[in-house]
Amino acid sequence: MKKILVCATLITSLNANAVLGPIPIYLNTEYRTDNPAIGSLASTLSFNADDIKATGANTFLDFLATVPSVGLYNPHGNIPALFMRGGESDHTLVLLDGVSVNSADSINGAVEYGLTNIALSDIAKIEVIKNSGSVLYGSSAIAGVISITTKKWADTKNFAINTKFGTHNSKTYTLLANDGDKDGFVRFIHNKYDTDGINAQTADSSGEKDSIDNQTTQIKLGNKNFDVSYLKSRNKTEYDGSDYDPVLNKFVMNPDKLADRKFNKLDMNINKSFSNTWKAKLLLAQTTSQRNYGTNATTVGDKYKSITLTALNDIKVDNALFTVGLSRLEDANTTNNLKHISTDLFVNWQKNIDDLDMNAGLRYIKHNKFGYHNVYNIGIAKELDNSIRLTGNYNSAFQAPTLKQVTSGTQINDLKPETAKNINIGLTKSHAWGEIGLSLFKNKAQDVIEWIGCDPSWSNCVYANQGKYTAKGAEILLDANTHGYNINFDYTYSKSRKNDSNEQPARRPKNIAGLTISKQYDKFSPRIQIISKSSTLDGGVELGGYTLVNLSSGYNVNNDAKVLFNIKNATDKNYTVANGYNQLGRTFEIGLNYQF
């Protein structure tokens, strides 16, 4: 307790704002100092609650599917993954109110089923940082960071009920109750999504369907300076797999497999303003997870626990802002009594000088298994004539092997941490109707850890550092509003290579494009989205590219009720994102949001 109290006097609350230059630098309430100066030096996408509602998504996975450049890979009945900017699936860190939801039970530490732990209706803001974030965020942030902030005090009516029904017997229910304001609030939300699904794997001839059942409950209470929350989530996903038959001496299809993952999160935030120039915040959190799997989920998986302690200070000195932080992350496999501990100290400096923005940071890492490491970032932005802005940044990154990679059953793998270097150059042009931007990026990682294979029981798995990985490419973003139409376009080209291979790694299309057009017509709010992805490789098989058309609209019955309509894959495109897996065809949904 003494240690916590000492940290509480050192940390940062980021809840007032102080203008330090031509672009304001904010001391805000987020987990990290994500402000206009830093944001302007990275490729960042931001979505608020209204943006999320407009997509018609049922789950956080559904929402990510509407952001093509994130690189979501989500075949029905298989494990979801993110390949941001062509990077590896474990190179994107996903945070929920500052706490990592990357799956400790994953074979490589990727977020996977952690994407199902998030109640979409409770999200206040999502920020997608497509750049190395290791200085401010630590390990697993090589390719980028997705930071999700949930709502606090009541921002609408005190009660809300949302329902949605659709194809494949899909059902979504959300119950929300909240009361109070920043001086004192309590908020409760329960979200459930389930669907009968489809027969996921093409090799399964049984005709059975693979269902999905996600449930998340969260309660949060506090005020503007203190809050505590508890989240409980459970995901059940049926899938088609294979089992080793010792009699036949081969693997045989088993359509009755189930992944049953339980996740709990308890966290506390304390904010303190010592003066106009010094704000402090403390985050203390514990997460537990377990995934059972196999036939009817009868194979009991290991239990994992993570404890996060983060102390932040935002200190304004003349025309500069210093962010000083201390973090300690303890990951434990409680089943096998294994533990990794990382204690980090980091500092970030930023300053505005006329039309020049500068940013630099350093993180010192002390890991109980992998020693001492340093990562850093340098960024600069220049305002040119004609509302043109030029940005550039250079970052290094670090990622420690996970507990599962180091010790798998009785298999001990001798591994080194992954390291990476990232460079990004951006150019944006502002107009009266909106903004257009271009980013060029290159990310190079060393000592990349690869899964080599497992024994037939999947109890002992081999991992090894397999050399280097390079991803480079370009992004074009357009955000416009003309004649009442909101138009968003993004295009990403990424060329990825492992070692000296000339082939694009699996599940990473070179070209991804998305176009969204929306307009408010009286009580109607129609929206059309077109997503196009080029061909990919998976399991040595080339999968053709595809274009999807999604339609949605809302109708405001009155101030309290809204009817929703969604048609996903409106052209009923027959497409594949994973070798041997089916995807949903055209789906219809209708829903009602009611608040009182």
Image: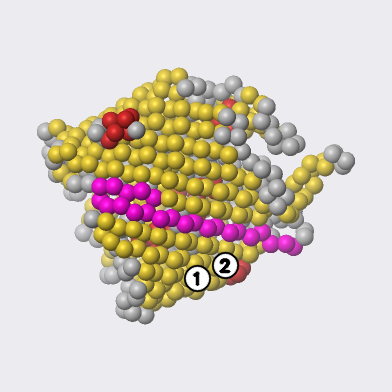
Give the vertical position of 356 relative to 82 (above or below).
above
Crowding near the residue tagged with mark 1, few <14, some 14–19, many ≥20 C-alpha atoms within 10 Å: many
Q: Amino acid at mark 1?
A: Lys
Three-letter code, disc 2: Ser
Main secondary structure type of the part rendered in magenta: strand
Residue 170 — which label? Answer: 2
Q: Position of residue 161 (x, y in %)?
A: 43, 70
Q: Is residue 199 left or right of residue 49?
A: right
Q: Residues within 10 Å of mark 2 (few under 14, many from 20)?
A: many
Task: Decide: is 545 above or below 394.
Answer: below
Boundaries of the magenta span: 207-229
Q: Is residue 315 above or below residue 158?
A: above
Position of residue 496 measured from the top left corner of the image (x, y, whole percent): 51, 37
Task: Provide the residue designation for mark 1.
Answer: 164
Q: Is residue 498 visible in the rendered structure shown here?
A: no
Q: Tell me which label, 1 or 2, sits earlier in the chain.
A: 1
Q: Are marks 1 and 2 in contact (CB under 8 Å)?
A: yes
